[in-house]
Image (cartoon, grey):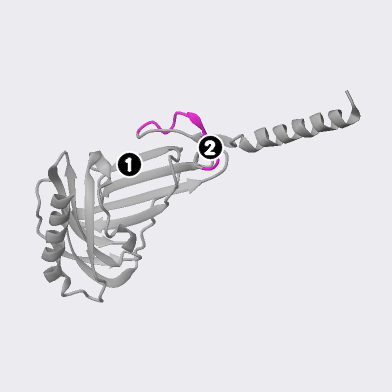
Amino acid sequence: MSVSSSLKSLVTICILAAFVSSTVVESYKCAQCEPEECNNGIEKTCDTSLGCFSEKKELNKTGQQQQPNQRILKKGCSLGKCDPKAFSATLGNGYTFGYGYRCCQTENCNKADFQVARKSSDPNGITCPACYSDQGSTCQPTNLTCRGEETKCLVFVGTASGVLPVFGMGCATETACNLKDMEVIDNVKIHTGCAGSSSGSPHLTSIIPSILTALFLLKVLL
């Protein structure tokens, strides 16, 4: 074999090696678990382009250590572009809800637990009508002093299998507004709407019926 032929063969091999290495998808491991099984140590290999995720949902009632306090945690490989989100809401009858969805792109970066939105005890000057019912489509609101970053007056309806099992009002972060078909606790999907954040908010009670009507119409149209 001539020197020129040898050089050509060497160049070809180098090009092929570079092409193969460039097409290899880098990967690493992410913690993988479903609700109620997040202490199992299971890992899954994921593409680095997708990354890992952790999702947490918490429904609590002040003063109760048993149900209806509920906590759902999921971890795994992101299936597409990761969209971080966090919000919290304080509803009537002492109920609070917190949600967090986090993304990361390193080995086992989603292994550790994390807290959903931390609530402040400092009043923010907003007052909202608040109530919570898991027995029907209405509830009797009372005034609730909003705190911290929960500066919006929230109204939500939740459905499961076409039935309306949950209805509520209260204070929420702005990131809790305008949610559509978001799945929360017990396979309930919620739609939310928010009123403004004027100090004192005496006019918000009169706005609530129009928000509620819009939510029901949205659910029907969907």
Residue 174 can be seen, yes or no: yes
Instruction: Identify the residue shown where x is 22% and y is 53%.
Output: 191
108 shown above or below 202: above
Residue located beneath label 1 in the image: 71
Locate the N terminus and report the quarter of the image it occupies. top right
Residue 47: assigned label: 2
Residue 67 can be seen, yes or no: no
Magenta stretch, residue numbers: 36-49
Of marks 1 and 2, which one's residue comes earlier in the chain?
2
Q: What is the x, y in percent for residue 152?
A: 27, 66
Q: What is the x, y in percent for residue 147?
A: 31, 66
Q: Let me know if residue 149 is in the magenta part.
A: no
Q: What is the x, y in percent for residue 19?
A: 67, 36
Quarter of the image for residue 122 reads bottom left
The kind of residue tagged 2 is: Asp
80 shown above or below 152: above
